Amino acid sequence: MSDAVCRQSQVRCVARRLRRVFAHGWLAGILAGCAMLAVAQAARKSGAATSTAAAPPAAKSRHWSFIPPVRHPPPTVKNRRWVRNPIDAFVLARLEREGVKPSPQADRPTLIRRLSLDLTGLPPTPAEVDAFVRDRRRDAYERLVDRLLASPHFGERWARHWLDLARYADSDGYEKDLFRPHAWRWRDWVIDSINRDEPYDQFTIEQIAGDLLPGATVEQVVATGFHRNTMLNREGGVDIEEDRVKGVVDRVNTVGTAWLGLTVGCAECHSHKFDPIPQREYYQLYAFFNNTDDRDIKAPLPTQMAGAERARNALDLAKRRYVSAPDPDLDAWARKIAALPVIWWVPRQQDYELPTFGANNGANLYPQEDGSFLVTGMVEGDTYYIMMLNTRLRGITGVRVEALADEMLPKLGPGWAADGSFVLSELLVESSPLSDVTHLQSNTVASAVADYSEPGWEVAKAIDGDDSTGWSAGIPQLAIAGLDRCAVFTLKQPIGFDGGTRLKVSLVQHGGPNYTLGRVRVSYTTADPAQLAAQAVPQRIRDIANIPTAQRTLDQQVTLKRYYEASFRPDSQALAEYSAAMADAPGVRGAIEAQAIEERAVPRVTHVHVRGNFLDPGPVVTPGTLSVLNPFQPRGARPDRLDLARWLVDPANPLTARVAVNHFWMHLFGQGLVITVADFGTQGDPPSHPELLDWLATEFIRQQWSRKAMIRLIVTSATYRQSSDERPELLSRDAKNRWLARQNRFRLSAEAVRDQYLAASGLLDARIGGPSVDVHIPRRGLYVKFMRAFPDSTLVTFDAPSATFSCPVRDRSDTPLQALTLLNDKLFVRCAQHLGDRMLTGQHGSATDRLRLAFRLCLGRDPTQEELGTLGELDARLEKIYQADPATAEQVAGPDRPAQAPAADAATCTVLARTILNLDEVITRE
């Protein structure tokens, strides 16, 4: 036998001994286990394949959730008069088996408040409550449901649920936690999609793979921002590849949670211990997302599309006008450039010594397919970019640095300064033999030449040893530059060692905040130094020059002429006019951007990560799905995310529809039919009503995946309309209300608590969508800027999720800090003052009328006589206190009290409002 096979045999032998040894005590068992582990590690180091990597596809499971749902007919029940739709038949059948009657229907004020909070997240107004209570039509309730489903606030409420699953936040996370100024664009897409009742299957496809749809629209590409909600580490010196791998893992796990309700992440390091998910299949899912790159796009809102189209047409006209006149000098120069020899070697990502390329001070270098690096992050002060690589090249004579334009940079770049410029203070070159990489030696740069230098910022100053000087290529008189620039640095002595060379190039940038390279490519040559002076031309320009004139596209013609004029005629009137036209184009001035992803032209090779370690690659895998579920039928030889998305929403998939309707049920009843919303696997709870869950799943598909249709079905059921009053006789039999003998009573979410206060006080700004706002702005909680490292304390106090991972179920805590927050938080105190003002200025003369108004604004009902009596006594005491202490009354009433209102009256109403707002019922959905 080979050594590997022999060691595997030893592992099996030790395992058998281990079972026998454990019978003689735990210590002996642990010692034997250590011996087995040592033998297993030896087997692995010898090259034996791990058992998880070689695991065969999962066998089909008989676990209930892996079997396609069966549409059961609604059961026959005794109390048929109670049944309003098939949901009730399934629920009542269970109750009748248990000998339990359903609870009576809640009263109308409770029903409208419940519906309003569940469907829109906002309380009903007193006028809406009155109208519903007085409406005696047979379909009054259904009319109310339809009105709330049609409200634009419905999309806000249900988008918040999806944002939890998508781990949405307005910042990157980690120590830097940089703000994401364009994250809101995807959030608004979700709101709009839900308001339009986009079918859930299309909603899924567009988020998973909207960019891969034929003729994808801007909105469909914006939808892929779902994947950009991963955290991103922008700390200086971070291992870019490690951080990228973490993001891909998060995307796999999030898809598994949000759509499949499975803990697929448990198979990252080894095959799942409980569910039939081999580690190999985990990395087949990983392969779908391993072939993507993050990309920001210009994404005007749908309302702006017409104007953007006009601007694009105007720019096209400007392009044609710009290149219309013949230019013999340009043509002669292009021929000269086309004749230049090809001498440059551009390293690719695999050539760099990971993780020793990167930057300091918060900048991150992201490798691009053309060998360049796109730089992101907040640069704090001076910075330098480091490119370290190992090469077998001998006699390296020159280094080329290209500063590249990019649509994601200010004014199209190539720098991060507001005007698109940069300053390269120094270029440093160091090298050593590969046999001694710890002792790098400096290499002298003899000369430098650039295609263009801004006056006073000549390229020679990038090798003068003075960090206060440097090379810049800006043209201040142009409205926008967006030009590739190039500098060639000739070494005094060629570099190269027998056995290979460690080469380090440092781009030192001390030009001030953001005067740094935004996209850069470094390449090397072994050519004769005498040839290098003529080589200072960006590669993109060289490529266009090599295309015959008649075959160049309009954009290529424009790019070539702009570069030529900016280099040799920077004061050209035609160049200035075209630059002004560019500055007015969509995507340049005031454009809205969105975070998205795109498929790589050259896919990455995906390996199983042995024990989850990306630095320990195992067998190669290709994109694929979980074999325990429905068959995977890709469109072509290489499956992509669009195939994955269609597999997820295939009606044969046993999980997607079940998981979705369980989410809907949870948000309408406080808990799902399957309580373990994120775990439909073998360790999760079984459904309380399995036949009902299957019926809802099949009905969802039959309803063309309509979210609104399913929610309407659920909320119009008699089951949903039941009172939430506890039933003492069931506390010992069904304490968690799994039989659904009543509705559930639960605290509002963090955002809804805020919304409730703002709505009751009259402060709420109910505009839909737009950029995220600071916490003191009276917008809905959905729009409050959520920074992962420093979230708003009020939202966190009421259990808002951290947005670190997908959150299918929020915690619901009950702490003293919540009560103190409601009482003392500045925003909530301001709400109490404004509610007090509403009590004062309403058409209500008596104290009782004022209290009734406050109750109706806060709770949607009239106060009881007992409540009126208690608050009436408090009203009288407060009036005396504040009349005797005007200074305190002024402070309590606040600066915005109504004109002519006595301070004592305003202070009294403020405290009464504060008291009512702090009732538990205000933040509770009955």
Image: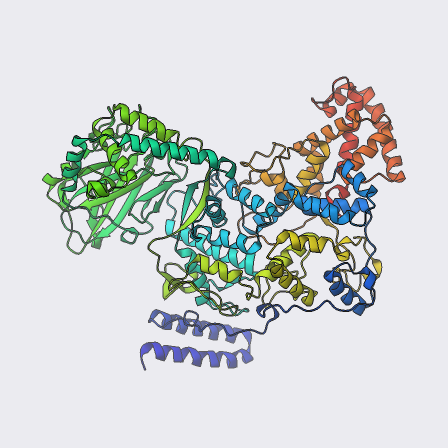
Q: How many marks?
A: 0
Residue 85 at x, y percent in the picture? 74, 59
The front one of 848 and 156 is 156
x, y percent for residue 491: 15, 40
Task: Identify the residue at image location x=44%, y=49%.
Answer: 216
Identified at 35% across, 80% down, the residue is: 6
Query: Image height check: is 739 above or below 395?
Result: below
Report the side of 402 relative to 176 (left or right): left
Query: For the N terminus, which image quadrant?
Result: bottom left
Q: Locate residue 709 relative to residue 584 in the image: left or right.
A: right
Q: Is residue 294 visible?
A: yes
Q: Residue at x 36, y 59 (%)?
A: 615
- Residue 50 left/right relative to 477: right
Q: Whole-percent x and y of residue 180?
A: 48, 40
Q: Residue 430 in the image: state x and y as whole percent.
A: 22, 43
**Residue shown at 52% from the left, 59% from the top:** 256
